[in-house]
Image (tube, rainbow, N blue to C red):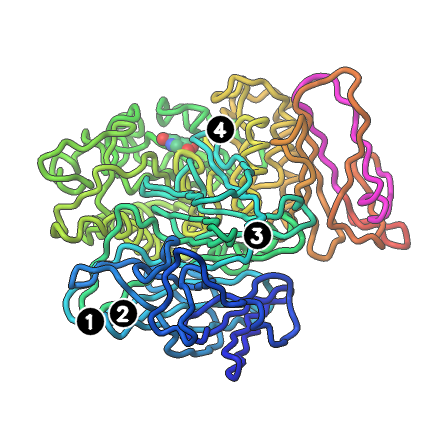
């Protein structure tokens, strides 16, 4: 997988279908020669034909007097010596200058994955992995940067991170240390990103890359609704199944930045890591700083190829192994059913209404603690609401248990309400700057997770709850971004490190809690999908994809999310109509079909279900259990983009290609609709599949080349859902 060609100074990182080839240039700088389709090992040093550029300074010791750092495809560029691109490393030296010159100082090859202290990282799995450590050093200022590359025998993803060590005497202030940086040899790219907003997460936007710097980032303290930590660079003709894609993502849940820069020679540099904006980390002599881990993939098989690589990586090497590929409880959540307006009696009635519905678990959402009757109080006081639930949680848990449902609880541990006992006793526990009133959002403040005492308080409080009650499932919410990022626990010179320390604090809390309660299932949430990233997915198997539960909106949200994250990480529920977010009315079946390929559940008042809907719930849950293996392990194919037209379609195919499910959704009704065939993907052309509903048997070859004829719909917002099962030679299928 990884080999070194010492004579030529080359490092070959080969994955099953790709090669990533680095060279120690004659000046000692590390450069990228090639990344793309897998290559035979030949002498490819010709690929960097050293050239200079007008108005580009030359390196002082260039062998022929003529090497510009600005035109070298540097793997970890620095600042100050004549490279005008975005540096991967930028720090203020004790003398006040910011110059740094990192040159190759050694390598080490190890078996296994690279871990990152205190942060999520790709996990060891069955298939082997190897890690290459490349050391770069600037002895003048005592800086050593170790670059780590992990490759896997079963994946085209490369995981990267960097560790910065300082041995220069006085303190170095680090402002920028990329997780990964690289240069691609031309500029013929389009950039695909996932911007959004609350209730409108991860919309796909594709634009020409163009000259200059494209910055995708978050400054909100969380990865954010507004921009997901993801970028794909694609060739203009790249589609779902063909064409080159370079995809990048980060195992990090805080302020990130991705920079894609096309320079004067149309070379493209890409960089991903912690956002250098408002970031400073002081390193004393002998100290190290680790970046979060980035994951990157080249696929020659279009966006679908990239997504399936990321999906497999997430399921096998990021998600918590105990839950990644095991049964997900079908939940019913009371948020949209009651909001804050519930009490013991109402919950008992909800439990009663769940009788004979084949649901697994009830989640008691916001409002069960302190004196929380609206969104403006009690966060931090995690004791049961005495008026609403005078006998504690036990009767609620019992009522649902009697109807066959386990119990889950909503918490928002990272927050504190000014109207809370905790705040009255310890107003300094929130993020704040002394002498300045902190800004409220949803009437709440953010607890200072950079403080160990705060983390200990939260750990003990959550432990108390989890020990007191049979809670199988936590919904871990976070309903505001960070602001007033200051802490009374840290000296002035550390204040610009707090956004990162907050994320480290969160990870440490999640790590300890999940180790203490290994059977606890946690669903992530941040006002829906405001922190939907590989960092969180290291600790939680699934995330509430969006607070927008409208089926037509969900087509876009789930389709966009699938670019990076597998369906097994996306929680999707059937909710009531008119939909609470959009006011739209869609059919119960349509709502079920759109949610079916994700972690399925309900977000409605079971008392309001009419008999036909109760029957539909039974059928939907039965289907969800039937198709769950595909949701957990299947390959996902996007067939029609809701961003491109009036319909949307996706499908899941089992790894052995014996089963598949297909969703087709049609948004607005049109008269005299153009004829249309829906070509499927990912099937085995040789296999024959029985298709339900209908029972027709067709080969994979026909289904993929000629396609299905989908029904003519009458009315807006329609769906059809197909299940395909291999038909064996004896005419049997396993339906
Ligand atoms: C935001 C979540 O996304 C909702 O599902 C719900 O849990 C509310 N918070 C509760 O405050």
Are the residues tagged 3 and 4 within 8 Å (C-beta)? no
Mark toward the start of the polypeptide (2 vs 4): 2
Residue 493 coordinates in the image, percent (x, y)? 14, 53
551 part of magenta stretch: no
User: Residue at left 64%, top 62%?
Assistant: 37
Residue bearing the label numbered 1: 168
Task: Residue 496 in the image: state x and y as whole percent.
Answer: 21, 49
- Tell which residue pokes out farthest to the bottom in this image: 7
Calculate the distance from the C-alpha at mark 3 to the C-alpha at mark 4: 23 Å
Beta carbon at label 4 within 8 Å of ligand 1 = no
Whole-angstrom CA distance, mark 2 to mark 1, is 7 Å
Provide the residue designation for mark 4.
Answer: 548
CA separation in Å, label 1 and label 4: 52 Å
Q: Which tag, 1 or 4, sits closer to the chain's start?
A: 1
Left or right: 140 with respect to 125? Answer: left
Q: Residue at x 51, y 41 (%)?
A: 193
In terms of secondary structure, where does tag 2 sit?
strand
| Region of the chain picked out in magenta, as a range | 695-723
Q: Name the mark nearer the viewer: 2 or 4.
A: 2
Q: Residues within 10 Å of mark 4 (few under 14, many from 20)?
A: many
Q: Residues within 10 Å of mark 1 (few under 14, many from 20)?
A: some
Looking at the rendering, in which quadrant would you find the C terminus? top right
Q: Which residue is painted at 28% across and 39% down in the image?
A: 482
Question: Which residue is disc 2 drawn over?
Answer: 143
Between residue 543 and residue 295, name the one nearer to us.
Answer: 295
């Amino acid at each position: 997988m990884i080999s070194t060609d010492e004579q030529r100074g080359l490092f070959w990182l080969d994955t099953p279908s790709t090669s990533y080839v680095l060279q120690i240039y004659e000046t000692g700088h590390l450069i990228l020669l090639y990344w793309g389709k897998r290559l035979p090992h030949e002498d490819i040093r010709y690929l960097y034909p050293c050239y200079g550029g007008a108005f580009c300074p030359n390196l002082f010791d260039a062998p022929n007097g003529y090497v510009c750092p600005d035109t070298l495809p540097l793997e970890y560029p620095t600042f100050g010596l004549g490279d005008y691109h975005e540096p991967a490393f930028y720090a203020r030296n004790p003398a006040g200058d910011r110059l740094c010159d990192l040159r190759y100082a050694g390598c080490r090859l190890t078996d296994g994955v690279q871990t990152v202290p205190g942060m999520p990282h790709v996990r060891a799995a069955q298939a082997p992995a190897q890690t290459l450590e490349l050391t770069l050093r600037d002895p003048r200022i005592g800086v050593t940067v170790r670059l780590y590359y992990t490759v896997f025998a079963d994946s085209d993803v490369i995981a990267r991170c960097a560790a910065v060590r300082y041995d220069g005497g006085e303190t170095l202030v680090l402002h920028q240390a990329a997780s990964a940086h690289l240069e691609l040899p031309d500029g013929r790219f389009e950039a695909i990103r996932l911007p959004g907003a609350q209730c409108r997460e991860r919309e796909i936007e594709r634009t020409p890359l163009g000259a200059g710097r494209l910055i995708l980032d978050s400054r909100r303290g969380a990865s954010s609704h507004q921009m997901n930590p993801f970028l794909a660079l694609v060739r203009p003709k790249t589609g779902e199944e063909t064409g080159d894609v370079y995809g990048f993502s980060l195992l990090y849940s805080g302020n990130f930045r991705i920079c894609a820069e096309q320079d004067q020679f149309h070379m493209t540099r890409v960089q991903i890591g912690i956002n250098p904006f408002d970031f400073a980390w002081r390193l004393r002599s002998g100290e190290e700083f680790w970046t979060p881990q980035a994951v990157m993939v080249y696929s020659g098989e279009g966006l679908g190829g990239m997504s399936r690589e990321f999906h497999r990586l997430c399921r096998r090497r990021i998600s918590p192994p105990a839950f990644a590929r095991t049964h997900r409880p079908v939940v019913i959540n009371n948020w949209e059913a009651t909001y804050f307006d519930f009490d013991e009696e109402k919950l008992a009635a909800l439990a009663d209404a769940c009788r004979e519905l084949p649901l697994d678990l009830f989640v008691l959402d916001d409002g069960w603690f302190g004196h929380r009757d609206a969104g403006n109080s009690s966060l931090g006081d995690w004791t049961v609401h005495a008026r609403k639930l005078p006998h504690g949680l036990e009767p609620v848990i019992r009522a649902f248990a009697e109807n066959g449902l386990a119990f889950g609880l909503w918490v928002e541990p990272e927050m504190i309400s000014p109207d809370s006992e905790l705040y009255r006793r310890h107003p300094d526990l929130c993020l704040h700057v002394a002498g300045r009133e902190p800004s409220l959002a949803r009437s709440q403040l953010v607890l200072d997770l950079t403080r160990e005492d705060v983390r200990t308080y939260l750990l003990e409080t959550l432990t108390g709850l989890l020990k007191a009650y049979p809670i199988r499932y936590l919904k871990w919410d976070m309903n505001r971004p960070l602001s007033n990022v200051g802490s009374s626990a840290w000296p002035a010179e550390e204040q610009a490190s707090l956004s990162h320390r907050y994320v480290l604090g969160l990870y440490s809390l999640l790590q300890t809690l999940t180790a203490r309660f290994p059977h606890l299932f946690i669903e992530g949430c941040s006002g829906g999908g405001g922190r939907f990233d590989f960092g969180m997915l290291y600790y939680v198997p699934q995330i509430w994809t969006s607070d927008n539960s409208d089926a037509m909106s969900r087509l876009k949200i789930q389709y966009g999310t699938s670019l990076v994250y597998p369906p097994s990480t996306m929680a999707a529920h059937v909710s009531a109509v008119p939909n609470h977010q959009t006011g739209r009315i869609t059919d119960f079946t349509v709502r079920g079909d759109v949610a079916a390929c994700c972690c399925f559940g309900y977000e409605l008042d079971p008392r309001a279900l009419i008999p036909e809907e109760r029957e539909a719930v039974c059928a939907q849950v039965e289907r969800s259990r039937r198709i769950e293996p595909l949701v957990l392990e299947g390959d996902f194919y996007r067939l029609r983009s809701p961003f491109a037209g009036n319909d949307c379609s996706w499908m899941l195919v089992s790894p052995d290609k014996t089963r598949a499910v297909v969703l087709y959704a049609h948004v607005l009704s049109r008269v005299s609709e153009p004829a249309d065939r829906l070509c499927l993907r990912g099937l085995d052309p040789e296999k024959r599949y029985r298709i339900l509903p209908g029972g027709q048997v067709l080969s994979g070859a026909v289904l993929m080349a000629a396609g299905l004829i989908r029904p003519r719909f009458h009315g807006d917002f329609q769906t059809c859902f197909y299940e395909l099962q291999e038909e064996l030679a004896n005419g049997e299928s396993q339906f």
